[in-house]
Image (cartoon, rainbow, N blue to C red):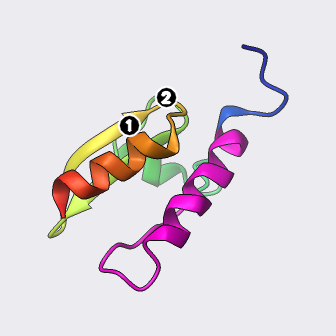
Protein backbone atom coordinates (compact mmCIF):
# COMPACT_ATOMS: atom_id res chain seq x y z
CA UNK A 1 0.00 0.00 0.00
CA UNK A 2 1.30 3.43 -0.88
CA UNK A 3 0.15 6.27 1.36
CA UNK A 4 -0.70 9.46 -0.48
CA UNK A 5 -0.90 11.15 2.93
CA UNK A 6 0.40 10.50 6.40
CA UNK A 7 -1.33 7.74 8.36
CA UNK A 8 -2.70 10.29 10.85
CA UNK A 9 -4.29 12.29 8.04
CA UNK A 10 -5.63 9.07 6.50
CA UNK A 11 -7.31 8.27 9.82
CA UNK A 12 -9.14 11.62 10.05
CA UNK A 13 -12.02 10.81 7.67
CA UNK A 14 -12.51 7.37 9.23
CA UNK A 15 -12.79 8.78 12.75
CA UNK A 16 -15.04 11.59 11.48
CA UNK A 17 -17.43 9.01 10.02
CA UNK A 18 -17.46 7.05 13.28
CA UNK A 19 -17.99 10.23 15.31
CA UNK A 20 -20.94 11.15 13.09
CA UNK A 21 -22.53 7.75 13.69
CA UNK A 22 -22.28 8.22 17.46
CA UNK A 23 -23.36 11.87 17.53
CA UNK A 24 -25.72 12.52 20.40
CA UNK A 25 -24.74 9.31 22.15
CA UNK A 26 -22.59 8.88 25.24
CA UNK A 27 -19.35 8.69 23.22
CA UNK A 28 -16.82 11.51 22.97
CA UNK A 29 -14.00 11.93 20.47
CA UNK A 30 -10.86 14.02 20.97
CA UNK A 31 -7.94 14.61 18.65
CA UNK A 32 -4.51 15.48 20.02
CA UNK A 33 -1.64 16.77 17.93
CA UNK A 34 1.38 15.28 19.69
CA UNK A 35 3.71 17.80 18.05
CA UNK A 36 1.78 20.61 19.73
CA UNK A 37 1.18 18.63 22.95
CA UNK A 38 4.35 16.61 23.64
CA UNK A 39 3.37 15.87 27.24
CA UNK A 40 0.33 14.00 25.93
CA UNK A 41 2.62 11.50 24.21
CA UNK A 42 4.01 10.43 27.58
CA UNK A 43 0.71 10.70 29.43
CA UNK A 44 -1.07 8.39 26.97
CA UNK A 45 2.03 6.18 26.42
CA UNK A 46 2.00 6.83 22.67
CA UNK A 47 5.04 5.61 20.79
CA UNK A 48 3.53 4.92 17.36
CA UNK A 49 1.27 7.19 15.34
CA UNK A 50 -1.59 7.11 14.83
CA UNK A 51 -2.83 5.66 18.09
CA UNK A 52 -6.49 5.68 19.09
CA UNK A 53 -7.00 5.29 22.83
CA UNK A 54 -10.30 4.18 24.37
CA UNK A 55 -11.31 5.28 27.85
CA UNK A 56 -14.26 4.29 30.00
CA UNK A 57 -15.03 5.90 33.34
CA UNK A 58 -11.70 7.72 33.23
CA UNK A 59 -9.55 4.61 32.73
CA UNK A 60 -7.79 3.52 29.57
CA UNK A 61 -9.34 0.25 28.44
CA UNK A 62 -7.99 -0.32 24.92
CA UNK A 63 -6.05 1.14 22.03
CA UNK A 64 -5.70 0.69 18.29
CA UNK A 65 -2.26 1.40 16.85
CA UNK A 66 -2.05 2.35 13.20
CA UNK A 67 -4.88 3.00 10.77
CA UNK A 68 -7.74 0.52 11.04
CA UNK A 69 -11.08 0.22 9.33
CA UNK A 70 -14.20 2.11 10.37
CA UNK A 71 -15.68 -1.25 11.37
CA UNK A 72 -12.77 -1.89 13.75
CA UNK A 73 -13.40 1.33 15.66
CA UNK A 74 -17.16 0.73 15.76
CA UNK A 75 -16.61 -2.81 17.08
CA UNK A 76 -14.36 -1.50 19.86
CA UNK A 77 -16.87 1.19 20.85
CA UNK A 78 -19.75 -1.30 20.86
CA UNK A 79 -17.68 -3.75 22.92
CA UNK A 80 -17.28 -1.21 25.71
CA UNK A 81 -20.70 0.48 25.70
- Counting from the top left corner in percent of width and height, residue 63 is at 32, 41
Q: How many marks?
A: 2
Q: State the residue at coordinates (61%, 54%).
A: 33
Q: Residues within 10 Å of mark 2 (few under 14, many from 20)?
A: few
Residue 11 on the magenta span: yes
The residue singled out by tag 1 in the image is 64
Q: Is residue 32 above or below residue 75?
A: below
Say if residue 32 shows up in the picture.
Answer: no
Label of residue 47 in the image = none
The residue singled out by tag 2 in the image is 48
- Counting from the top left corner in percent of width and height, residue 71 is at 44, 43
Near-viewer residue (65 or 47): 65
Q: CA distance from mark 1 to mark 2?
A: 10 Å
Q: State the residue at coordinates (50%, 60%).
A: 18
Q: State the residue at coordinates (30%, 56%).
A: 77
Q: Residues within 10 Å of mark 1 (few under 14, many from 20)?
A: some
Q: Residue furthest right?
A: 4
Say if residue 11 shows up in the picture.
Answer: yes
**Left or right: residue 79 compared with residue 34:** left
**Left or right: residue 8 compared with residue 44:** right
- Quadrant of the image containing the C terminus: bottom left
- Quadrant of the image containing the N terminus: top right
Q: Residue furthest top?
A: 1
- The segment highlighted magenta reads 8-31
Q: Secondary structure at mark 2?
A: loop
Q: Quadrant of residue 20?
A: bottom right
- Counting from the top left corner in percent of width and height, residue 75 is at 31, 47
Q: Is residue 51 above or below residue 28?
A: above
Amino acid sequence: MVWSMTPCRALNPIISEVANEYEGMDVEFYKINVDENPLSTAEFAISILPTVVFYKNGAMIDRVIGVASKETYIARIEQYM
